[in-house]
Amino acid sequence: MIRAAIAECVRALAQSVYAQNQDLPADSRPDDWEDIERTRGGDPEAYRRLIERHQDYVARLLWRFSRDRRVHEELVQDVFVEAYLSLRGYNGRAPLAHWLARIATRVGYRYWKEKARRREVEPFDVEKWDAAVSDGHAAAALEPDDAGALLHQILAQMSPRDRLVLTLRYLEQCDVIETARRTGWTKTMVKVQTMRARNRLRKLIEQGGTELVL
Amino acid sequence: MNWEEKVERLAARAQAEQTPHVDVTQSVLHLLTAGPAQPLTVAERFWMWLAAAASAVAVPAGTVALILYTRSAGPLNEIVEAISWAVQ
């Protein structure tokens, strides 16, 4: 009884310290833990609340992995199914949103690897890319959706591993530690992989004749 | 401005992108309730542990029984052979 109370206090303290030190998504909520416990006890309503609370955040993360709405929705669904099945492994030391981000990254990366195995290549029109970013009004007029789509298209030309590290680096603006946390790689591996992927992206842009004018 | 700064600017602009709204609540709950992979109930967990404990006891017990049988098979055969005339 006393041990459980102490564990609860430590968990709450760890979460508050963690929340102060990290740029937490708005979806991280202190009442998650109660719903997690209820879900573990077999209460589906508690899991419904968890999904409702976090699905927008997970959807935002997975939009970087697929811009096909049907696939995107399936990936979000997969994340919550996977999270439910491994919920017993969640120890509460980090906010639930961060744990879900790791699962989302894993699910998205797996999707890319499956696509690469099937040799599905997303179309990338270099001329369209050049036209979109090279003309005069590009800097001011490019809509966020178009900017996201353009980056998605060019990163889709890379291997899943390169694409993952660059997506986290550029689009999710993750630092080395956060990238390591999400991918499960070591920090050294993240640094090496980032350097290699950046070199390959530079070559891709330069060889593709892409002149970004922003 | 080099290529990476341009890509970073593009990425910064993409930060303001609106993600399509999804609602997977029903589909996830449906999958979890319809699918086989649900958390075990207390009764199921009890039977699972009971089965595991029974297996844990049965395997060494079977091994011991096999060893004892092998050891005793020799003398037993001698006794059987000694009284085999009575059977005939």
Image (cartoon, coloured by chain):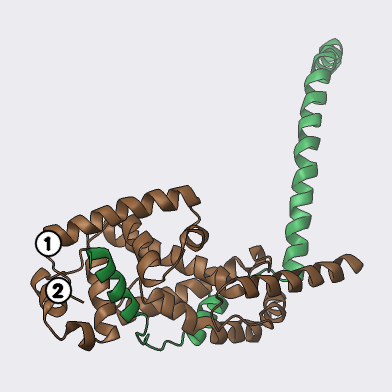
Chain colours: A brown, B green
On the rendered image, what quadrant is the N terminus of chain B found in? bottom left
Q: With respect to residue B62, does A132 lie above or below?
A: below
Instruction: Compare residues A122 and A16 and report the one nearer the observer.
Output: A16
Occupied quadrant, residue A5 = bottom right
Residue on which the image places disc 1? A208
Q: Position of residue A2 (x, y in %)?
A: 91, 68
Q: Look at label 2 and name its amino acid.
A: Trp
Q: Amino acid at mark 1?
A: Gly
Query: Mark 1 and mark 2 in contact (Cβ < 8 Å)?
Result: yes
> x and y percent of residue B47 in the render?
75, 61
For marks 2 and 1, the one nearer the N-term is 2
Q: Is residue B58 left or right of residue A166?
A: right
Q: Label 2 to label 1, Cα distance in Å?
A: 10 Å
Check if mark 2 and mark 1 are on a common chain.
Answer: yes
The chain ID associated with circle 2 is A
Pick the residue in front: A127 or A50. A127
Tell whether A118 sits left or right of B36.
Answer: left
Q: Quadrant of the C terminus of chain B?
A: top right
Question: In the structure shown, which secondary structural element does the residue marked by tag 1 occupy?
Answer: loop
